[in-house]
Image (cartoon, rainbow, N blue to C red):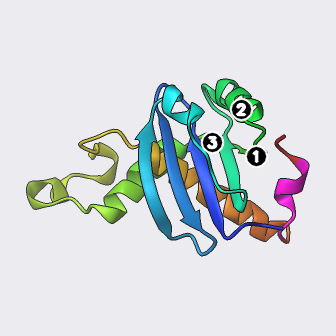
Amino acid sequence: MLSLVILALDPGLNIGIAMVCLDGTVRHLNIITLNDLRSLNPLPSVTIVIGNGTGSDRVQGILREQGLSFAVVEEAGTSLEARELFFRDHPPKGLAKLLPRGLRFPPRAVDDYAAYAIALRFLKREADAGGNAHASEGF
């Protein structure tokens, strides 16, 4: 059964974290280090999803050491989706509004928004599969 909250992780040099409700709304966004991940202690009722890109094996290993189960989600293209999600939440102001979308760059790292994009992909996959997609992947 799917949890009420998704904890999505975007692995990499920094790890983006997004806590997302089943309706796709964000509860919390953050960017942490690998050491911070080791001290992460999610509630058992949280579904953990991880992108399969750079650093994913390392993050999966840490979660396995902690006895946590997770699902793996394709993360190709989430960096571009992260920029779109960032600008949706933080619309450009002033002259920046005149720039074409492809030329806009966020003023900070968006690893947390990449995790949000991973959570949204997982939720879509769950909906498309009738709610059982996570049972075949992960730990």
Task: Report helix, strand or loop for mark 3.
Answer: loop
Can you tell which quarter of the image residue 131 is in?
bottom right
Residue to which mark 3 is pinned: 75
Please tell me which residue is depicted at 66% across the width and 24% down the height of the picture.
58
**Viewer-proximal residue among 99 and 116:** 116
Answer whether labels 1 and 2 touch (C-beta < 8 Å): yes
Quadrant location of the C terminus in the rendered image: top right
**Segment colored magenta:** 131-136
* Amino acid at dot 2: Gln
Position above or below: 94 against 104: below
Q: Earlier in the sequence, mark 3 or mark 2?
A: 2
Q: Residues within 10 Å of mark 3 (few under 14, many from 20)?
A: many
Residue 57 screen position, x and y as percent: 70, 26
| Tally of numbered discs | 3
* Amino acid at dot 1: Phe
The span from disc 1 to disc 2 (Cα, nearest Å) is: 8 Å
Residue to which mark 2 is pinned: 60
Q: Residues within 10 Å of mark 1 (few under 14, many from 20)?
A: many
- Checking the image for residue 128, the label placed there is none
Q: Say whether residue 134 is magenta.
A: yes
Residue 13 screen position, x and y as percent: 48, 25
Residue to which mark 1 is pinned: 70
Q: Residues within 10 Å of mark 2 (few under 14, many from 20)?
A: many
Looking at the image, residue 74 sits to the left or right of residue 138; the answer is left
